[in-house]
Amino acid sequence: MTEERANELVNKLYENNDLTNEEFDEMLRSTKSDELLYKKADTVRRSLYGKDVYIRGLIEISNYCKNNCFYCGIRRGNKNCERYRLTPEQIFECCKEGYSLGFRTFVLQGGEDAWFTDEILCSLISKIRESFPDCAITLSLGEKEKESYKAFYDSGANRYLLRHETADPEHYRKLHPIELSSENRKRCLFDLKEIGYQVGSGFMVGSPYQTTENLISDLRFLQELQPDMIGIGPYINHSETPFADFQNGSFTVTLRLISILRLMFPYALIPATTALGTIHPRGREMGLCAGANVVMPNLSPKDYRKLYDIYENKICTGEEAAQCIQCLKGRVSSVGYNIVTDIGNVKKH
Ligand code: SAM
Ligand code: FES
């Protein structure tokens, strides 16, 4: 692609928030438009969110999971994974500590662990809601029935993160065992929206068997869903999975996609993910410069962090929460942005 063509495509995306499939294909396959893409994405991000970076306190509540996703290190089939689950009291303590450190969003994430019944979760969510009325409670606990999502919402949860992983049903089939389907995952996302949650979706970049066409389907699915949050990160290998022999996803394609997403969805909350920071030492900083506006420091108790081992060499497993936030504040300000104490709602309209 020539320089001129690259500029033409970026400007078109900037003005229309969209391109044709053929144009996306051209852009995704070339590095030529990258510098201008980052610049335009940053302009759009600053026009809506200024220099603000929102923080979300991530609490990894359990690494037990009934699922067996082929890419994931905490899959049921990994017999070498040492399992843990936090008690509701421990989770509540993490929120308390997070609040004092300036967090106004707590993200409860975990494998699909049947120990956490709807009853246990609703009682925990209610307690967090009553104690921290000025905070958002985000859940990321996988696929559930609509009634369960509704019960959590009624107890005080208000955001849900569920990546669609890949929008193409055939590609989905290659990443998951037969009992999981793209159709059900998408059903969950639309149920969550209907209930009233602020919804986050997203996908892995460079997951095994992924094609550029698959990535374009992902962009189209997000246009249909119109999520508030979009989380993407590179696929990272884990040796105790059936995908042990596959390569990590590309860092530059992930950055390129962050910028494309910012231009397609100017209002979106887009994290510079831990996976991005894992495959490149300045990955999160570069993600922010490419259009991301959220970081998700870990609030889990230090002793359990290493066990939430979804991919290898995951960063930030050795620090206390307070150290983590200090480190991130430095990283964020080193590229000209500021971490803010704010609930960090989407600025949609
Ligand atoms: N169980 C919940 C769910 O299914 O949404 C939340 C936990 S799951 C580990 C969170 C996300 O981790 C997944 O949506 C997936 O995109 C990401 N993930 C899992 N394995 C990964 C890997 N090997 N590399 C990069 N990301 C991975
Ligand atoms: Fe359940 Fe990864 S297979 S969290």
Image: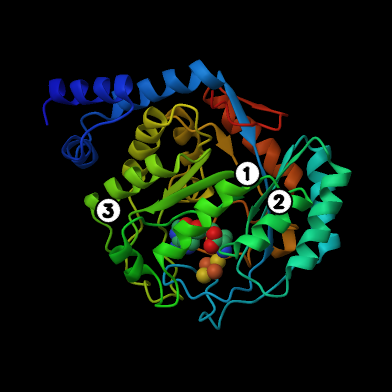
The answer for how far apart the CA atoms under marks 1 and 2 are is 8 Å
The answer for how far apart the CA atoms under marks 1 and 3 are is 29 Å
Q: Are marks 1 and 3 in contact (CB under 8 Å)?
A: no
Instruction: Give the answer, above or below, for where 317 lies relative to 115.
Output: above
Note whether residue 219 is visible. Answer: yes
Of label 1 and label 3, which has the lower sequence position?
1
Q: Going by the image, does 56 lie left or right of 125?
A: left
Residue at x 20% of width, y 30% of height: 32
Q: Nearer the viewer, mark 2 or mark 3?
A: 2
Give the x, y percent position of residue 106: 71, 46
- The numbered mark at residue 153 is 2
Residue at x 79% of width, y 54% of height: 125
- The numbered mark at residue 196 is 1
The amino acid beneath tag 3 is Asn
Of the pair 342 and 130, the residue shown nearer to us: 130
Label 3 secondary element: helix
Q: Are marks 1 and 2 in contact (CB under 8 Å)?
A: yes
Of label 1 and label 2, which has the lower sequence position?
2
Residue at x 32% of width, y 26% of height: 37
Give the x, y percent position of residue 130: 87, 45
Residue ID for mark 3: 214
| Within-10-Å neighbours for mark 2: few <14, some 14–19, many 20+ | many
Q: Quadrant of the N terminus?
A: top left
